[in-house]
Amino acid sequence: MLEAISERLQRVFKTLRGEGHLTEKHVDEALGEIRRALLGADVSLAVVKDFTTRVRERAVGKEVLTSLRPAQQVVKIVHEELARLLGGEVKPLRFKGFPAPVLLVGLQGTGKTTTCAKLGVFIKGKLGKHVMLVPADTARPAAREQLEQLGSQAGLPVLDTRPWPTPSEIARAALIEARRKGYEVILFDTAGRLHVDDSLMAELVELHGILDPSEVLFVADAMTGQDAVKSAKAFGERLPLTGVILTKLDGDARGGAALSVVSATGKAIRLAGIGERLGDLEPFYPDRMASRILGMGDMLTFIEKAQEVVDIKQAEELEKKLRKSEFDLEDLRDQIKQMRGGGLLSQIADFIPGAKALKGVEVDDRRLSRFEAIISSMTAQERRRPDIVNGSRRKRIARGAGTTVEEVNRLLRQYAEMRRMIRRFGSSDPRKVLRSLGL
């Protein structure tokens, strides 16, 4: 999303670091480049002016320009001001009452319904609360059916709201049903429009009065740029918004909405959609996002994601096997599944400092998929003892995996090479194992 602005800012700071001594002229030239980068990313002019003014006030101080590493001090100031621009501190969701209602609002087409299901998955999985989804959009055809389908995929209960024709009746019924069945949180997917109008806002204001929600979250599509900022501001003038959920943060738009919406509304970005899967919703960390924009990486998020993907007990068992050179094809299949399922490899350049050079180097997912299919086509004995896989077995395995004998031979050759490396180096690092496969 913010790749273009990130590259431009990193070039600016590379130039600054090349200067042995910084002057106000150097700072002003750098700020000019930063201003152009922000405007090119569709950040609003008012936000850009305020940002660069604050950075300059801090950067041209005597303690910065006369310090031993003035360029590093300027980078630090820009990082702090970017984090402030993005909302400052993380603001976790809060829940009040039993049940605690959460109202999702926004324009049509921003992804409210999908976000409602994603938020349910997040609250249930990360916060451990019992959640019910409530389709309160009576205007859009098939809105109820869409949320019911998403709820089914996510394993979340969805209230059947067909008996009640209006959102206000749905709200009252949902409160009663949630109390009766013991749901702690109820998420309301509300109606949207193509633009802000009085009837929409009157409906939402009435819903707010009935529910007295814990959170009123504006769902903004990051791909729409400044339009998202304008609509958020309009909603904030009529409703007591408590925060913003930014969808499609993984898209290829310029990213100005992410850098403008906080200043325009005075409300923090609370969560961000980073993919199409129901689990692709995560807390928004302003300081971490600022680090990623400036090319400093985001190791905390990377570690958290790795911990979600990696089975710690399985990793400990794998280390023991590697130390004893007992790593077999079953273990290799488990590692391939983790690599393909976690989604970390495709995001690694965003998280690790200096890894942008890896952006164009992608793991061949098709080869991993073929290798996994080949190993799955083997018997348990063959996976434990690949040396017994003769010519006839290879033909059978290839047919079962829908591939060729040559692919089976390639896997077995690379596995044999990997075993030699383990014996040679005594490796307990699975990454060396994967590198030995040329993956």
Image (cartoon, rainbow, N blue to C red):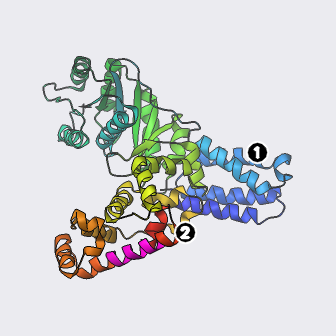
Q: Main secondary structure of the magenta part?
A: helix
Q: Is residue 84 magenta?
A: no
Q: Nearer the viewer, residue 310 or 163?
A: 310
- Identified at 56% across, 59% down, the residue is 5
**366 left or right of 96 in image:** left
Tell me, yes or no, if residue 368 can be seen here: yes
Q: Residue furthest left?
A: 163
Q: Quadrant of residue 37?
A: bottom right
Give the residue displayed 22% in from the left and 67% down from the top: 378
Does residue 423 lie above or below 309 as drawn?
Answer: below
Indicate the position of residue 238 as horizontal and vertical percent values: 42, 28
Q: Which residue is mark 1?
A: 58
From this view, report whether residue 420 is shown above or below residue 11: below
Closer to the camera: disc 1 or disc 2?
2
| Mark 2, residue position | 357
Q: What SS does tag 2 mark?
A: helix
Identify the amino acid type marked 1: Arg
Q: Residues within 10 Å of mark 2 (few under 14, many from 20)?
A: few
Q: What is the magenta range?
A: 411-421
Looking at the image, is mark 1 or mark 2 earlier in the sequence? 1
Residue 251 visible in image: no
Percent x, y for residue 319?
46, 56
| Of the pair 213 and 340, the residue shown nearer to us | 340
Q: Quadrant of residue 216?
A: top left
The front one of 430 and 79 is: 430
Task: Name the side, left or right, on which 296 lies relative to 41.
Answer: right
Query: Which quarter of the rendering shows the C terminus?
Result: bottom left
Residue at 84% in and 46% down: 63
Is 240 located above or below residue 52 in the figure?
Answer: above
Q: Residue at x 62, y 46 (%)?
A: 82
* Disc 2 residue type (three-letter): Ala
